[in-house]
Image (cartoon, rainbow, N blue to C red):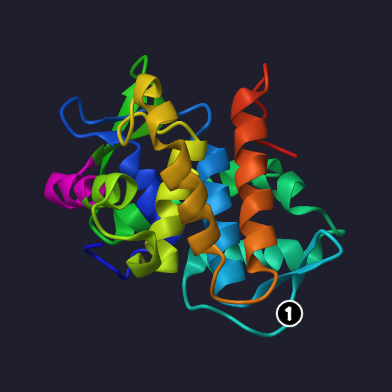
């Protein structure tokens, strides 16, 4: 995908943007999708591992150099043990806010400061690099629909599409079209965790956590 330096959570956040209306879609569930991307990337990098179903830091010192990923890694280290599915929701908005701030700092989002009722300060965001978002979406669609064999898709690109579909990001695939991609998504899920032993289990647990969070009748992104 273009802009390969973007982290998985950053890509997922940008994929939720409607560049025509310049607004983010699926905002209620987006924190879960973005958090799932961060968990998956940390697992793919070997910094989080699965120990009897628990998301476990490999050590207490490693860093990625990405403030969003390192922030989540520190949160996991300082918290009591939780399963992967729990981490998809637990304080998920913290990761979403960190991703948004980093994208703004890096020039992908524009920050618009205003005052509500002329008194209370407020911040809104808009896409600054619409062409990048559209390119990411087109590449993701190609990964989802083919014709490139799944075996030739990178584990990072496979993870982006797997989690985007699980989170119902309609800018990638409308709800009515999801069923026709089920077989491909299953294969991409397997591909997402192909790099290391046990990683497939992690990816499946994180994906299941997203599906459960999105399907839940109530939305809670805090603790």
Left or right? Give the position of 81 relative to 197.
right
Left or right? Give the position of 36 relative to 59.
left
**Residue occupied by mark 1:** 58
- The residue located at (45%, 38%) in the rendering is 165
Question: Which stretch appears magenta?
Answer: 127-138
Q: Is residue 100 visible?
A: no
Image quadrant in which the N terminus is located = bottom left
Q: Under tag 1, what secondary structure?
A: loop
- The residue located at (73%, 79%) in the rendering is 58
Residue 88 lies, with reference to residue 152, above or below; the image says above
Residue 46: give x, y in percent of width and height.
62, 78
Q: Residues within 10 Å of mark 1 (few under 14, many from 20)?
A: some
Verify whether residue 48 appears in magenta. Answer: no
Residue 162: give x, y in percent of width and height.
47, 48
Residue 201's quadrant in the figure? bottom right
Q: Is residue 5 visible?
A: yes
Closer to the camera in the image, 104 or 180: 180
Main SS of residues in magenta: helix
Residue 203 lies, with reference to residue 124, above or below; the image says below
Verify whether residue 132 appears in magenta. Answer: yes
């Amino acid at each position: 995908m273009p802009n390969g330096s973007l982290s998985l959570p950053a890509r997922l956040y940008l994929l939720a943007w409607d560049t025509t209306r310049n607004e983010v879609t699926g905002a209620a569930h987006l924190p879960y999708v973005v958090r799932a991307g961060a968990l998956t990337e940390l697992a793919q990098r070997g910094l989080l591992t699965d120990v009897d179903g628990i998301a476990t830091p490999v050590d207490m010192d490693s860093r990625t150099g990405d403030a969003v990923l390192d922030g989540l890694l520190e949160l996991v280290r300082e918290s009591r043990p939780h399963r992967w599915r729990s981490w998809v929701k637990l304080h998920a908005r913290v990761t979403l806010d960190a991703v948004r701030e980093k994208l703004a700092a890096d020039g992908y989002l524009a920050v618009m400061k205003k005052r509500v009722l002329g008194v209370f300060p407020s911040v809104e965001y808009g896409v600054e690099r619409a062409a990048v978002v559209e390119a990411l979406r087109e590449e993701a669609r190609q990964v989802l629909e083919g014709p490139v064999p799944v075996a030739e898709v990178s584990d990072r690109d496979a993870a982006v599409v797997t989690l985007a579909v699980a989170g119902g990001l309609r800018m990638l695939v409308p709800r009515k079209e999801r069923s026709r991609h089920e077989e491909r998504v299953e294969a991409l899920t397997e591909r997402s965790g192909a790099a290391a032993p046990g990683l497939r289990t992690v990816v499946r647990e994180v994906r299941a956590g997203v599906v459960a969070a999105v399907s839940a009748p109530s939305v809670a992104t805090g603790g």
